[in-house]
Image (tube, helix red, strand yellow):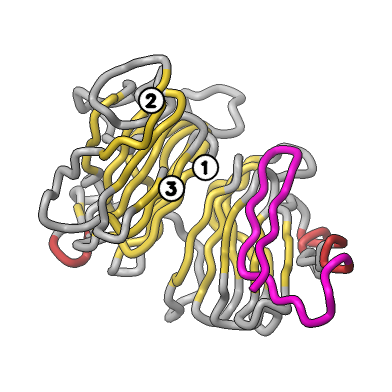
Amino acid sequence: AIVGQSGTLYTFGLNNRGQCGMGKISNNVWHPTAIVNPSQNDPIVHVALGLQHGLALDGAGHLYTWGKGERGQLGQGQGTSMENTTAASVLKVVDFQLPSQKRRIILTGDDAKIKCASAGMNHSAAVTQSNHAFVWGKNISPPGPDDGNKAAVDSSAPRLVTGFPPHLDIVGVTCASHHTSFLLSDGSVWGIGVATDNGQAIMEAVVEMIPSGVIDMPVRQFVGHFDRTTVVGKDGRQVLEVQFWSHEELREDAALRPLWMDQLGREERVRFVSQGWMHKVVVTD
């Protein structure tokens, strides 16, 4: 996917699950093709791609999804006509609810506008202007009383993420394949999802992955890769990788400087890192 200078979103590649958002299913989209922007007046400012679904955020804070949705990764809400279905056309995500024992509290207006979003392999995440974090899709919710021995269950509706320290802004969110990381204004990183070491589902509340005072803020890049989260510090000299561990002992001092940094020149500054399943690309200034 490519976002042009005018804010037009172009996609190309495999489209057998509608993951190019063209409005129809096909084997491939061979050339960059513009997606029809549902908001029409607001440019696209950010795009995130999962395994077979995509998200786009426009300048007005509206979030859109498309592609494979059988595990709820499009966030269309439980009981809707588009719940757990594949969508070749772009859909708007609007069902951001706060838990309440008395009645549903749905965020509206500026509170419901999205400031950042990300896509994992089969799940999605977003943070609202009101500083609420949500996740939805495959294996992102604690099991209910009728779910047997399942460690986690799917959610087709955005689920509120809890457990953050009070009075701190969430300034970034990124999805790896099976976990989601959040960057807070004090430089700490918190996560939720399936642990790397033993597959334990940590869903009830976020846990701290990197304490404050470690990351050189503001960051150049905060991005989830296949099994880890990568952070590039403010001047490009600091790069940290952290995986999502189940045990508190493993999470202590878990942010490590990758070995490939030793292959760079002393004056090289990292601009960003992109990583696939078994390969990596590093771009420097």
- Does residue 273 show up magenta in the picture? yes
Residue 163 lies within the magenta run: no
The answer to whether the residues at label 2 and label 3 have Cβ atoms under 8 Å apart is no
Amino acid at the residue labelled 1: Gly
Instruction: Judge by depth and name the residue closer to the eye, 43 or 83.
Output: 43
Cα–Cα gap, marks 2 and 3: 18 Å
Which residue does the image show at 72% across and 49% down from the upper left? 280
Q: Position of residue 77 (x, y in %)?
A: 27, 35
In the image, residue 240 above or below residue 274: below
Region in magenta: 263-285
Residue 48's tag is: 3
**Badge 1 is on which residue?**
120
- Residue 163 lies left or right of residue 23; in this view the side is right
Residue 74: x and y in percent read 34, 35
Residue position marked by numbered label 2 in the rendering: 29
Looking at marks 1 and 3 on the same chain, the residue that comes earlier in the sequence is marked by 3
Q: In screen coordinates, is 32 left or right of 175?
A: left
